[in-house]
Structures are given as structure tokens and as C-alpha cells.
Amino acid sequence: MLDDLRADVTAALTGTLRSGTLRREVDGGQDEYGNPLPGVVTNYPFEGIRGSYDAQYAGMSGIPREAAKIEILAASITVEPARLDVLTIEGAWWLIVNIEVDPAGSWFVCQCQATVSPA
């Protein structure tokens, strides 16, 4: 049943949401002398929406008022978002603080805080 729900949600929403990009930087390790190497950055496009948390829910959960709730359609991205990944959607940059997945696996719900554009 949940697989059917995921397929239905994906079919209904693909192409109707906002475009975004998840930016993941992986540590580059060290060279033969122990010097740090630059990290490798990979960008993953996705479809999603940016919203905010209900004031009562945020207050009871300890979520800062300025936090954004960014929901990513799971079928639209090739990786699972991870804590400390950076997102851009609707012209703003966000750092993922926490992630939840709905029971059907159709959405990643990311609690994010504003950040600056990565270099």
C-alpha cells in the first residue's frame, strides 16, 4: 500500500514543484605528505517546496522561528539528503539540521537554517 502511495504522490507532483539543488561536499582526504586535499562537491537537482513550521509545533519542538521546512520529493533526487548538506531553493541557501522521511518514503522533510552561498 505504501509503495502505491509513493507512486501516486510522485506521479501527481513531478514537474509541479519548485526546482532546487542539494550540494554535498565530501572530504578530499590527504596527500602523501599529510596535507589536506580539497573536497569534492557534487550537486543533485530536486523538486520540492519551501515552507515554515507552525508556530505552536515549532515552539513545542524547540525549532527556531527562522528555521525553514524544505520538503523534497524523494523520487526527484538520486541521493538521500544528509545532515549538514546545503540546499538552494527559491534563491536562498539552507543548511540541513534535521531530516525526517514520511512513512511511504515519498518526501524528505528537512529542517533547515539559513546559510550563505558556498564558495
Image (spheres, rainbow, N blue to C red):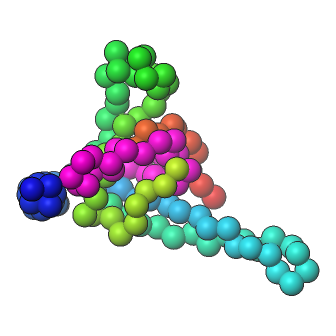
Asked which quadrant contains residue 36, the reply is: bottom right
Residue 48 appears in the figure: no
**Residue at x-position 70% and y-position 73%:** 28
Residue 48 placed where, x, y %? 28, 51
Q: Quadrant of the C terminus?
A: bottom right
Figure check: 17 above or below 68: below
Q: Is residue 25 left or right of residue 49?
A: right
Question: Picture coordinates of residue 88 (x, y %)?
Answer: 43, 52
Q: Is residue 94 magenta?
A: yes
Q: Main SS type for the magenta part?
A: strand
Determine whether 36 is above or below 111 in the image: below
Answer whether residue 96 is magenta in the image: yes
Span of residues in magenta: 84-109
Residue 59 % position (x, y) = 42, 16
**Residue 84: in sight, yes or no?**
yes
Indicate whether 96 appears above or below 9. Answer: above
> Residue drawn at (41%, 35%), measured in percent from left and top?
68
Q: Residue at x 56, y 50 (%)?
A: 84
